[in-house]
Image: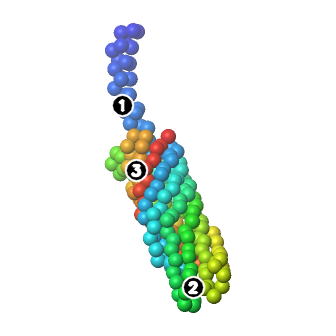
């Protein structure tokens, strides 16, 4: 029996070990990702570009070449600015783009050994605030506003697997209706998959 185990079973187990390790599905499980990139807003009287920063958590499942999962993200942006002479000479209107929450799903296909191409869609809620000053009144703003704007996001990207670490490149479009316009973002993500 010992001879049988040494000559047949042990070599079979050692030969199968690399194949078993390869069966672990890449691009599955939970991950945390830091994101940064370009954020461009247009519409609703705004046409401005800023720097986007934030983080996301994802959980992906799948088998074979197909992957699907959920994602939640929070980001901020440096977009903001002021304009003068909108209503009367010397007035000043300023706006600031605040945080952006996103929750949605991902669907992708593994290409090669270490690349996942994916699309995404979901709900987004962005904060926009601002002030308006008329020079004929006191120095404090005449009007202050802040609004949370609901919308949807569509995107596509590529994720590169580097062991437990990952790199993402992604384009996404968010639409907040005529009230807050739309956003185009190009981001890079660096993350860790557990």
User: Does dot 3 land on a helix, a strand or a loop?
Assistant: strand
Residue 22 x %, y %:
38, 36
Q: Is residue 31 above or below residue 15?
A: below
Disc number for residue 167: 3
Q: Which quadrant is the N terminus positioned in?
A: top left
Residue located at (47% from left, 77% from top) = 47
Colour setting: rainbow
Residue under label 1: 18
User: Does dot 1 land on a helix, a strand or a loop?
Assistant: helix
Residue 111 x %, y %:
35, 51
Residue under label 2: 91
Q: Residues within 10 Å of mark 1 (few under 14, many from 20)?
A: few
Q: Is residue 74 above or below residue 136?
A: above
Residue located at (56% from left, 55% from top) = 72
Tell me which numbered mark, 1 or 3, is placed earlier along the sequence: 1
Depth order, front residue of 15/84: 84
The quarter holding residue 179 reads bottom right
Name the residue at the top extreme.
Answer: 2
Q: Is residue 86 visible?
A: no
Q: Is residue 146 visible?
A: yes
Depth order, front residue of 37/11: 37
Residue located at (60% from left, 74% from top) = 130
Residue located at (40% from left, 33% from top) = 21
Tell me which numbered mark, 3 or 2, is placed earlier along the sequence: 2
Q: Residues within 10 Å of mark 2 (few under 14, many from 20)?
A: some
């Amino acid at each position: 029996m010992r001879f049988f185990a040494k000559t047949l079973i042990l070599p079979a187990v050692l030969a199968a070990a690399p194949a078993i390790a390869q069966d672990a599905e890449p691009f599955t499980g939970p991950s945390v990702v830091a994101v940064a990139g370009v954020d461009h807003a247009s519409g609703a009287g705004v046409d401005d570009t800023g720097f986007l920063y934030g983080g996301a958590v994802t959980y992906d499942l799948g088998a074979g070449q197909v992957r699907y999962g959920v994602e939640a993200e929070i980001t901020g942006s440096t977009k903001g600015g002021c304009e003068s002479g909108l209503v009367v000479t010397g007035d000043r209107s300023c706006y600031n783009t605040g945080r952006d929450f996103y929750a949605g799903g991902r669907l992708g296909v593994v290409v090669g050994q270490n690349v996942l191409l994916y699309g995404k869609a979901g709900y987004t809620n962005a904060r926009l605030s601002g002030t308006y000053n008329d020079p004929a009144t006191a120095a404090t703003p005449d009007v202050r506003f802040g609004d949370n704007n609901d919308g949807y996001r569509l995107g596509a990207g590529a994720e590169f697997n580097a062991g437990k670490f990952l790199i993402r490149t992604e384009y996404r479009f968010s639409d907040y209706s005529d009230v807050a316009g739309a956003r185009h973002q190009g981001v890079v993500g660096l993350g860790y998959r557990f």
